[in-house]
Image: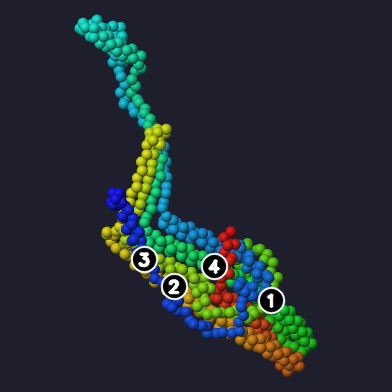
Amino acid sequence: MNMYFRHPPRWVALFGLALLASCATFDPPGRGVDELPVPESYTLYGPSAPAPEKWWEGFDSEELNRLVAEALNDSFTLEQAVARIRQAWAAAKQVGALRWPEVGYAGDASTTRTHIDTGVSTSTLSVASQKLSALNALLGGGSPGSGVATTPAGAAAAALQSAQSRLQGAKTLLADTPPSETTTRNESYLLGLSASYELDLWGRLRASDRSAQLSFEATREDLYTAMQTLTAQVVLTWLDILQYQQVIEVLRQQLEANQTTLELVELRYRKGRATALDVYQQRQAVAQTQAMRPPLEAQLDTLLHELAVFLGKPPRTDLKLTADVFPETGPLPDQGLPADLLARRPDVRAAGLRLRAADWQVSAARADRLPAIRLTASASYNAAEWDLLFDNWMAKLAASITGPIFDAGRRKAEVERTRAVVDERLAAYKQAVVTAAREVEDALVREAKQREYVDALQYQLETARASHREALARYQKGLNDYLPVLSALTYAQSLERGLVQAEHDLLVYRTQLHLALGGRWMERELGALEE
């Protein structure tokens, strides 16, 4: 048998051990709906019908549909939310990249110039002595005849020595004076690749990656929540605008009626059928109606500015609003079961995703307490001259293992911290679930009671108008003074304005019900926002 297979390298055994150990990860436990405080059903149910996926379309208003579409396309709030999604995606990608090998390159080319000044130069007398000795050697010093060799070989050696002396003398005569400063130049070239990879023995990198992905998905649910909230804000602001427009119109009609009544009272006063007190009381009613209008008009302009900002436009932009009456509420939308809120409410889904992300952070913290193995490899070329760069190379492959021995409890404390985060987010998830169920219950109760209130208010207004007619008839017959007429008139006009407010509140509660039930329409709109 081949000795290589009988005694494999140690790194092969180490790699096999790592593969076996990689199965021992710290996956978080599964979570079910049973641990959530979800009620079995809602308390109030009534006749219902399937609502449009985009719930505001149930109001059957082209103007409202246009406003919501503009808000979803141009809102600065949604632009910020989309930017946060991109940040979360980039952060998740950074964490996920740690699970892959990292390969890099390096290149270096340098030139070094060294200048040395000794500060000592050769003296003139010394140079002259060297030149004189060289001239003497050139003219005859060290000639063959001056030696003691008498053999032919000795004569040849003496002749060669004499020639060398003459040549050295000539070089010395021709050489410049040695300088006191010298400059040298050195060059260096380097080109290399490096790679590193951490074996995910205990699933730490995988857990961190999964946690980052879940955090990204939670951020996307935050965008869905922002979209849902923005549509509700647009609808509610639009309803407020309609309310103030109608109240101002009611005030205009009441002012005309009060001024007409004032003219009649003044006419009766001139004929002696009314007192001055009657005139002053009716003038007070006219002035009171006139005083109500400026604050309402200011509030209306403020709402128009607010709606423009929701649409990403300057405050004074003409929004081309033409609607002047409230839309119909229609039948109640299907509420389903409270458990459906876990999938329909984006804020509830976000809370659940953040809980799962915290679970995976616990897994990563637990795995961080165990040893880690990292593999590294590098190859490089290095030379002092460019044309020799690829003739000199070096390659290196290494493996390292690191693990904690003593860290004063830092890693253990991190595990405890992440587990506390899990407990916090579990409580937040439960809170989000019960809050969502409560909001649906609240909206159902408010709408049901508001309908009763609107019906009662309409009946109350009818009786107030009848009381005013009777008081006016008795006044005209001289059976009573003007105060009962004025009281009945003021009360009826107050109910007219209150009825507008009550019908507005009914639509508000329907909007809140749609908002509490959630939806999935935001997922289809996200692609258009990210373009």
The residue nearer to you, when weighing 73 against 394, is 394
Examine the rendered structure and indicate whether residue 273 appears above or below residue 80.
below
Label 2, label 4: how far apart the Cα atoms are: 19 Å
Q: Kindly identify the amino acid type of the residue bearing the numbered disc 3.
A: Phe
Q: Kindly identify the amino acid type of the residue bearing the numbered disc 1.
A: Val
**Front position among marks 1 and 3:** 3
Q: Residue furthest front?
A: 1
Tell me if 508 is positioned left or right of 157 in this view.
Answer: right
SS under mark 2? helix
**Residue, disc 1:** 325
**Residue, disc 3:** 26
Which residue is found at the position 48% from the left and 63% from the top?
216
Q: Kindly identify the amino acid type of the residue bearing the numbered disc 2.
A: Ala
Q: Looking at the rendered structure, which numbered label has been put on residue 428?
A: 2
The residue nearer to you, when weighing 41 against 485, is 41
The residue nearer to you, when weighing 108 against 452, is 108
Please report whichever mark, 2 or 1, sits nearer to the chain's N-terminal start: 1
Q: Are marks 4 and 1 in contact (CB under 8 Å)?
A: no
Please report whichever mark, 4 or 3, sits nearer to the chain's N-terminal start: 3
Residue 473 position, x and y percent, is: 74, 91
Q: Kindly identify the amino acid type of the residue bearing the numbered disc 4.
A: Tyr
Neighbor class of circle 1 (other Cα within 10 Å; few <14, some 14-19, many 20+) is few
SS under mark 1? loop
**Residue, disc 4:** 224
Please report whichever mark, 2 or 4, sits nearer to the chain's N-terminal start: 4
Please report whichever mark, 4 or 1, sits nearer to the chain's N-terminal start: 4
**Front position among marks 2 and 1:** 2
Examine the rendered structure and indicate whether residue 157 appears above or below residue 67.
above
Q: Residue furthest bottom?
A: 479
**Front position among marks 2 and 3:** 3
